[in-house]
């Protein structure tokens, strides 16, 4: 073995040992990612997600964890506003919190009583067991543009 290869192997061993001793695990990270993807998939296949009105709204969100800049539909008349749609999956003990978050500028859309400036958001939230069952669903935040008549 050359000296360069020995140094590289030594560095890999030291880093692996440090991660193991600190409680970090590459395997745990990969397992967490697989389980979060499974939780998101379970939501997308659930009857709650596939209820007609909700499906048409949530189908616009990223199919993986992430955020996209989009034109958010404002009701059913074809009007849109600029905004972001974010898909987020967060571990919550043995369960998973799956959030679909729409965010827009208050100047572009607000209801009476809402702030007139800044960002407004609305969240569609699902709690998923590690077995893929939806145990709770709720909505939070401001009235979303998608619900406008």
Image: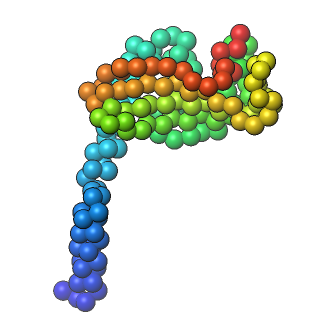
Residue 38 image-quadrant placement: top left
Q: Residue furthest bottom?
A: 3
Q: Judge whether residue 44 can be spotted in this image.
A: no
Residue 64 picture location, percent across and down = 45, 37
136 vs 26, nearest the viewer: 136
Query: In the image, is residue 96 above or below residue 24?
Result: above
Residue 12's place in the image compared with 55, above or below, is below
Name the residue located 26 percent from the left edge and 27 percent from the top edge.
131
Quarter of the image with the C terminus is top right
Q: Quadrant of the N terminus?
A: bottom left
Residue shown at 56% from the left, 40% from the top: 67
Q: What residue is drawn where x is 28% and y is 31%? A: 130
Q: Position of residue 16 (x, y in %)?
A: 25, 67
Q: Quick check: 60 above or below 28?
A: above
Position of 36 compared to 73: left or right?
A: left
Tell how many labels: 0
**Colour scheme of the rendered structure:** rainbow
Residue located at (39% from left, 26% from top): 127
Q: Position of residue 21 (x, y in %)?
A: 24, 65
Q: Is residue 147 something that shows in the picture?
A: yes
Left or right, 106 with respect to 85, comes to right
Q: Position of residue 3 (x, y in %)?
A: 25, 89
Q: Residue furthest left?
A: 1
Q: In this image, 19 relative to 52: left or right?
A: left
């Amino acid at each position: 073995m050359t000296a360069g290869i020995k140094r590289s192997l030594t560095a890999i061993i030291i880093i692996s040992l440090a991660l193991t001793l600190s409680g970090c695990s590459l395997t745990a990270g990969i397992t967490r990612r697989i389980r979060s993807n499974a939780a998101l998939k379970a939501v997308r296949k659930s009857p709650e997600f596939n209820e007609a009105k909700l499906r048409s709204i949530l189908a616009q969100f990223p199919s993986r964890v992430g955020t996209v800049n989009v034109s958010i539909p404002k009701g059913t008349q074809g009007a849109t506003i600029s905004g972001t749609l974010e898909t987020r999956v967060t571990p919550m003990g043995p369960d998973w919190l799956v959030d679909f978050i729409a965010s827009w500028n208050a100047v572009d859309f607000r209801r009476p009583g809402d702030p007139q400036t800044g960002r407004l958001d609305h969240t569609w939230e699902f709690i998923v067991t590690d077995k893929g069952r939806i145990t709770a669903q709720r909505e939070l935040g401001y009235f979303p543009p998608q619900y406008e008549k």
